Image: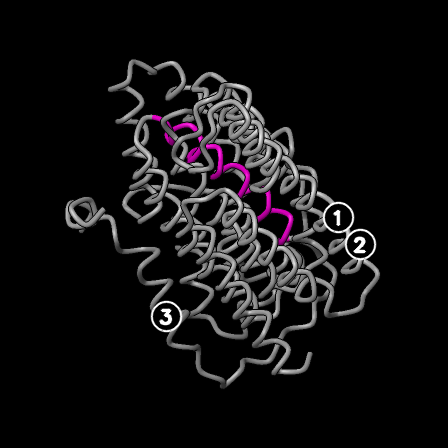
Amino acid sequence: MNPQANLIFIISLLLGTTITISSNHWIMAWTGLEINTLAILPLISKSHHPRAIEAATKYFLTQSAASALVLFSSMTNAWHTGQWDITQLTHPTSSLILTSAIAMKLGLVPFHFWFPEVLQGSPLTTGLLLSTIMKLPPIALLYMTSHSLNPTLLTTLAILSTALGGWMGLNQTQIRKVLAFSSISHLGWMAIIIIYNPKLTLLNFYLYAMMTAAIFLTLNTIKVLKLSTLMTAWTKIPSLNAMLLLTLLSLAGLPPLTGFLPKWLIIQELTKQDMAPAATLISLLSLLSLFFYLRLAYCTTITLPPHTTNHMKQWRTNKSTSIMIAILTTMSVLLLPISPMILTIV
């Protein structure tokens, strides 16, 4: 793609995100979401592969339906209350429609079907944008309206997302699909706590975005898309593979790595809110996703393919790993000991 065009799309993405997260009026928030959708479409379909075109079409249809629902929800609320302010969403029907629209935007169960397909059809760098920056505006809208959302509905969506995200990721061989189901599972953890402690949702999102960025950038460096090619990629940059192993375990939420921090705080908050059964259930369901993270981690650092057919060994590359990947992987592994400082900032 032309570098100037690429720059315009990236700037439009940042502009759309900024407009949505800084707006008070529903129409401005909707405008930001639309700019975001239109800016990411060329980045999804830039390879001109039929699968990429299909992914862009699916993304456009689901996002436009979700945007229409956001507009419908805000108009219903304005009709009943005379308020266009985002924080004044008080009408129950409006909050129900908005929850459905945001679930569709994010890819929460039962509106999750588009997300793995779109991620599978996108390049790794676009997949990174879809998993991180594109999730920020909908989460910001949930954050601003968290006081008027339905707790039962969100808890149900969250537990279903964690269950299906873990369950459907078990049998995947394509790494982008595994990361898509991992994203759905993490969104369940964010959705369950948004009503009780919205700041924890934001903290969880920031840490998730950081770990996912580290994984996507690492995979992009070693040019790996499938589990079978991941098995022989250890010869390229062995030190990067070792860090990828730790980052995957961190994303799984194993102590003493960074990914354990949001899970620990969310379980603690849920038990304070007398929701111990929900906390137990969501913790047990996250074991499903732990299985496929361990599978990925095992394939990352395995030194010999587990069958007799000969594999082409990759040449070790001399190119140095970017400083960005070094910083992200280090933070993805080592932030747990400074969690008290992180909590004072948040």
For label 1, the SS is: helix
Residue tagged by mark 3?
326
Looking at the image, residue 23 sits to the left or right of residue 180; the answer is: left
Q: Quadrant of the N terminus?
A: bottom right
Label 1 belongs to which residue? 58
**Going by the picture, which residue comes out furthest to the bottom?**
318
- 57 versus 91 height, above or below: below
Residue at 33% across, 68% down: 327
Q: Position of residue 308 (x, y in %)?
A: 71, 58
Question: Label 2 amino acid?
Answer: Glu
- Viewer-closest of 199 and 316: 199
First to last magenta residue range: 175-195
Q: Are marks 2 and 1 in contact (CB under 8 Å)?
A: yes
Q: CA distance from mark 2 to mark 3?
A: 34 Å
Q: Please state which of the two labelled residues, at mark 1 or mark 3, is closer to the viewer.
A: 1
Amino acid under label 1? Answer: Lys
Quadrant in the picture for residue 292: top right
Residue ID at (49%, 84%): 319
